[in-house]
Image: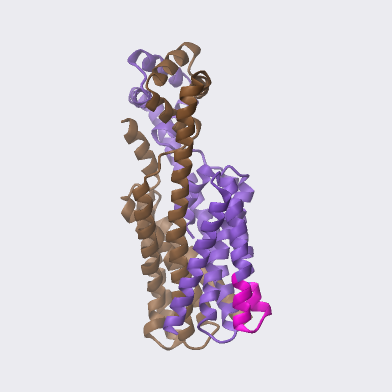
Chain colours: A purple, B brown
Amino acid sequence: MEYTAYKQHKEQHFAAPDFIRDIVIGMSDGLTVPFALAAGLSGAVSGTNVVVIAGLAEIAAGSIAMGLGGYLAARTDQEHYANELERERREVSEVPDKEKEEVADVLRSWGLGDTDVNSAVEAISKDPEKWVDFMMKHELGLEEPEPKRARNSSLTIGLSYIIGGLIPLSPYIFIHNAFSALLISVIATLVALFIFGYIKGRFTGSKPFKSAWQTTLVGGLAAGIAFLVAKWIS
Amino acid sequence: MEYTAYKQHKEQHFAAPDFIRDIVIGMSDGLTVPFALAAGLSGAVSGTNVVVIAGLAEIAAGSIAMGLGGYLAARTDQEHYANELERERREVSEVPDKEKEEVADVLRSWGLGDTDVNSAVEAISKDPEKWVDFMMKHELGLEEPEPKRARNSSLTIGLSYIIGGLIPLSPYIFIHNAFSALLISVIATLVALFIFGYIKGRFTGSKPFKSAWQTTLVGGLAAGIAFLVAKWIS
């Protein structure tokens, strides 16, 4: 559920194809929260009917929050980028000297001496598009967002959340004994979390087995604590 | 200016103090999913007891997934950064010519001519720390993560998720008529979502009222669909 905050952060290090990356993000989050909710409820209510209703409601809510929420956040980024681009273009044509000084500041910060700075500033500011591009990247640190990508990405993440959430939930749909359903759900989901953690680790360039254990730990801990909370208040 | 330029850019999307930013992120997510789950369940089960149990289990699960998950992701980022830094340092001392060529490639992409490139490369590569720093930022596009910030941030986001989640849930705790509780929960949460959307908009530099409406829409839609899903299968 940490989409908006950590998504951009995550993206930097994800060397995988975007599509696979989105599936892994949506599915590992979908595995975690519905899993924990179902496990928690199964310890507090009798019968699996309520677990299935709550689980499906959560999957609906979570996938919309993640998919639609992520999509709108991406659109806001696009608007923000477009506004800043507009402003930089205006400034480059209206106050070129001030903008050149800003380019010079950036270059100086990299250890370039005055002579180098001056001639590099001239080179960069010769082409207004490159100049604006330089300012966007190095003064403001903004990368151009891809409009189509945002839509596809949100859709993939939302759908993967649904599929991920159905893994811990399906035992409760087909098995009517709450304890048996819980047992199978826990085993199936921990295995799935481990596999997705491993895949995530491969794509992030970190150690796959470490990532697998961590992903399993987060899901398992969330489920365990949800179980205790539900048991305690019921 | 050098590091301020990069700091500014990082905060460009979110000009607020980190602490407030984390509160808004955790709280607006906490408002959305537990809200939708409680609304969904209230249409499908009689009595508010199950709603409260499921809601608190979800809050426990969501805050752990968001807090602990975010923390581990940040730690992975730190390790990744440290590994890449180590590698760049090694490359700079072992294959300096290749690394100089990489600096030159970056500079050329900004429109600098050969003379400028050569003397800028010399300037940058004079100071190994600056050189490595340049490669990390401009070749690999990696910013140095802040270790302490990751921990505090995860804690703030997790706690804000809990507080945010208690807003839609508290009517069900204190009012035992499911319909009255739902009504008060919907009104209170939509107002809270609107306020948080507004605050989020102010900090992201986008239009506050637009952000307020969007945040309310995501929460309201998630709750509406969760309600329909739960009603349909119960």
Going 63% across and 49% down the picture, which residue do you hit? A19
Q: Nearer the viewer, residue B63 or B85?
A: B85
Horizontally, residue A146 falls left or right of residue B34, namely: right
Q: Residue A189, image x and y in percent?
A: 60, 67
Q: Is residue B24 visible?
A: no
Horizontally, residue A109 falls left or right of residue A125, namely: left
Q: Nearer the viewer, residue B160 or B60?
A: B60
Q: Is residue B229 above or below residue A67?
A: below
Q: Residue B65, image x and y in percent?
A: 47, 62
Identify the image quadrant of the C terminus of chain B: bottom right
Q: Nearer the viewer, residue B79 or B137?
A: B79
Whether B22 is among the magenta residues is no
Number of on-image labels: 0
Q: Is residue A101 above or below residue A167?
A: above
The span picked out in magenta is: A170-186
Residue B116: image quadrant is top left
